Image (cartoon, grey):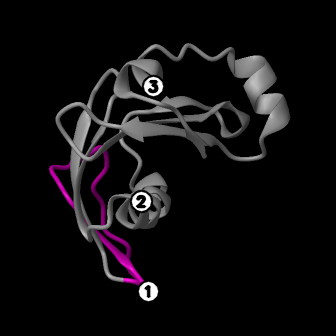
């Protein structure tokens, strides 16, 4: 996780996927205080074939406790400022994080055992 000073600095990121993939096994979360929400983020994971994830629930499970402690609040509003943009409502419950927001379904199916 990389914490930057402001939303504009996160928005301006344009990482080169090759070198980034070489220095991280999974991905990098970039975050900063938001202009109109508690915090913003972006998630880059070229090492696993994802140049930039549009909205990352797992990243917000890391970000929520960090920002909750830093801002001294347990309910936070967040924006992942990828090209698709996602709004998440995050709650820090100590041993778990609850996330709410709209989802974009990309796959539906049924598994029978």
Mark toward the start of the polypeptide (3 vs 2): 3
Task: Tell me residue 7's x, y (percent).
Answer: 36, 27
Which quadrant: the C terminus?
bottom left
The mark found on residue 10 in the picture is 3
State which region is magenta: 94-113
| Dot placed on the residue nearer the N-terminal end, 2 or 1 | 2
Above or below, comparing residue 76 to residue 48 in the picture? below
Cα separation, mark 3 vs mark 2, equals 18 Å
Point out residue 24 in the picture as x, y percentages from the top left corner. 77, 41
Q: Residue at x 46, y 58 (%)?
A: 58
* Label 1 Cα neighbours within 10 Å, binned few <14 / some 14-19 / many ≥20: few
In this view, the residue in front, 73 or 87, is: 73
Location of mark 2 (residue): 70
Which residue carries the number 1 mark?
Answer: 95
> Magenta region, mostly helix, strand or loop?
loop
Q: Is residue 96 magenta?
A: yes
Identify the residue at image location x=32%, y=67%.
72
Disc 1 on helix, strand or loop?
Answer: loop
Q: Answer yes or no: is residue 105 visible.
A: yes
Can residue 82 be seen at all in this image of the molecule?
Answer: no
Q: Does 34 sit left or right of 12 as displayed?
A: left
Residue extending farthest right = 22
SS under mark 3:
helix
Q: Residues within 10 Å of mark 3 (few under 14, many from 20)?
A: many
Residue 91 placement, left or right of 58: left
């Amino acid at each position: 996780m990389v914490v930057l000073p402001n939303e504009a600095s996160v928005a301006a990121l344009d990482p080169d996927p090759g070198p980034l993939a070489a220095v991280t096994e999974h991905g990098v979360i970039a975050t900063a205080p938001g202009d109109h929400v508690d915090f913003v983020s972006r998630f880059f994971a070229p090492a696993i074939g994802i140049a930039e994830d549009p909205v990352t629930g797992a990243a917000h499970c890391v970000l929520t406790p960090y920002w909750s402690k830093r801002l001294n609040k347990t309910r936070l509003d967040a924006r992942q400022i990828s090209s698709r943009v996602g709004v998440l409502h995050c709650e820090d419950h100590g041993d778990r994080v609850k996330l709410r927001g709209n989802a974009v379904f990309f796959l539906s199916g049924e598994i029978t055992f």
